[in-house]
Amino acid sequence: MSSERSAIILAAGLGTRMKSSKPKVLHEVLGRTLVGHVLRSVKAIGAARQIVVVGAAADQVREHLAEVAPEAETVYQDKQLGTGHAVSIAMDAHPDLKGTVVVAFGDAPLLRSSSIAELVEVHEKKGNAVTVLTAFVDDPTGLGRIVRDNEGNVLRNVEHRDADAEELAIREINSGTFACDADVLREQLARLSTANDQGEYYLTDILELAREAGHTVGAVVVDDPTETLGCNDRSQLAELRRILQGRINTELMKSGVTMDDPATTWIDATVKVAPDVTLRPGVQLKGATAVDSGAEIGPDTTLTDTIVGAGAVVVRSHADQAHIGQDAHVGPYAHLRPASKLAESAKVGAFVETKNAEIGRGAKANHLAYLGDATVGADANIGCGVITANYDGVHKHRTEIGEGAFIGCDSVLVAPVSVGDGAYVAAGSTIVKDVEPGDLAVARARQAALTDWVAKKRPGTVSDQAARRAKGEAGVAEA
């Protein structure tokens, strides 16, 4: 038997019950599409070829594969004539395939790499022609049953709608994942018929056909039946998401991550979380997010494609494509937009928004500020209400704030502009020219007072009475 290995992923269906213009296999479950999860799992067998059978919305699937699995090849299934027909198209398009061919559904994201590896190992060690992955389930309704003889040998698969009463009582089900000898697979695919209730070419019929032809047929039973679950509608998609959530969270907690409330903690399969990280309730970690040891995230925080350094704290905030340095503090209610970078011990506080901004070591913007297209030097202080006015209606411009600078409350820095190291900007200033190091910039009108304006312009009002009392004028009633 050849040592070559290949994989065929069936992803041609639209999935009409999903009620979506997007093909079923492109719906996401915690960081990857359904087909993306399956492709990642089959990598465990070291497949030299990954062939994806596409059909409905083929261009969308091909475009996605080019992004997540550029090594994958596609073949087109014009008419949906069953799983056997789909595999036949793939085999006909690749007549050079030899050795072991794994066939899996593209909508089964819970299938573990270890289970596929075990399937192939057993298949090859025992010299089987076909080996099917199976599971025992409490409710096999709608699923194909594995029929065995009295000695436990696999005889055939029977679909639910084709099964008799005795077969319907069987709890061992076919997962839809097979390991096959390429030559035997070709032979038996040619013998498939549509003599069944659906009038389709069932791939599962190769179990019985191969056995009748004198080949050895076997099965590997997975311990966790949820691995075999597919997806036909949005309800099942949510169920898959919940199961994968529990699996990911359990693995992370075993590795040393603390979760106050795993039920409200959602972590993509693509995320990395180090030991001794604490995740509070309502945390979502998405995409390429990575959190280093000792960090504390949450509650109620969403991080997407964000790097969090050791010991950092992020509270009730959102970050997208940001970098939060070691021992930095973010939130509550902060918004870090793409290309925001906080250095060690920097602080971005309540209702502060950053975008394409570098916040230096120990610098702080504690509340109610916007820092866009800006560089903030180490230990600088950004007061409440400060805005970097970075957009002129056509182009973005950058603001440079030096080390140890102090930007007073309610100031506007109109870019392009720089504030030198150690410089001060007086509260309420609008800065349109560079400020030299160590200078104080004041850009506001002088304060003026119009004496007794209230008494003249607002006589008899609450304000007028309060002012008169403050001045000790006689005859003014107490409020």
Image (cartoon, grey):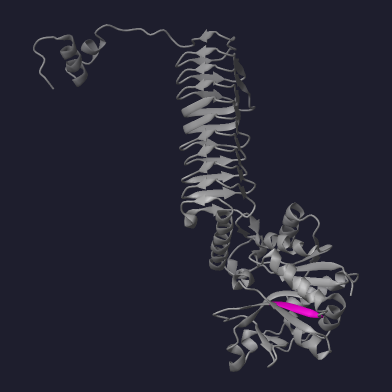
Does 331 sit left or right of 309 as displayed?
Answer: left
Q: Which quarter of the rendering shows the C terminus?
A: top left
Q: Nearest the camera: 465 or 403?
A: 403
The image quadrant of residue 1 is bottom right
Residue 437, placed above or below residue 289:
above
416 horizontally vs 465: left or right: right
Is residue 131 within the magenta segment? Answer: yes
Q: Magenta residues?
A: 129-133
Q: Is residue 474 magenta?
A: no
At horizontal 85% and vertical 75% (from top left) the residue drawn is 182
Q: Give the percent coordinates (x, y) of residue 348.
A: 51, 31
Q: Can see residue 96?
A: yes
**Left or right: 16, with 90 as reference point:** left
Q: Is residue 434 above or below residue 300?
A: above
In the drawing, does residue 76 fall left or right of residue 299? right
Viewer can see residue 86: no
Q: Residue at x 62, y 85 (%)?
A: 160
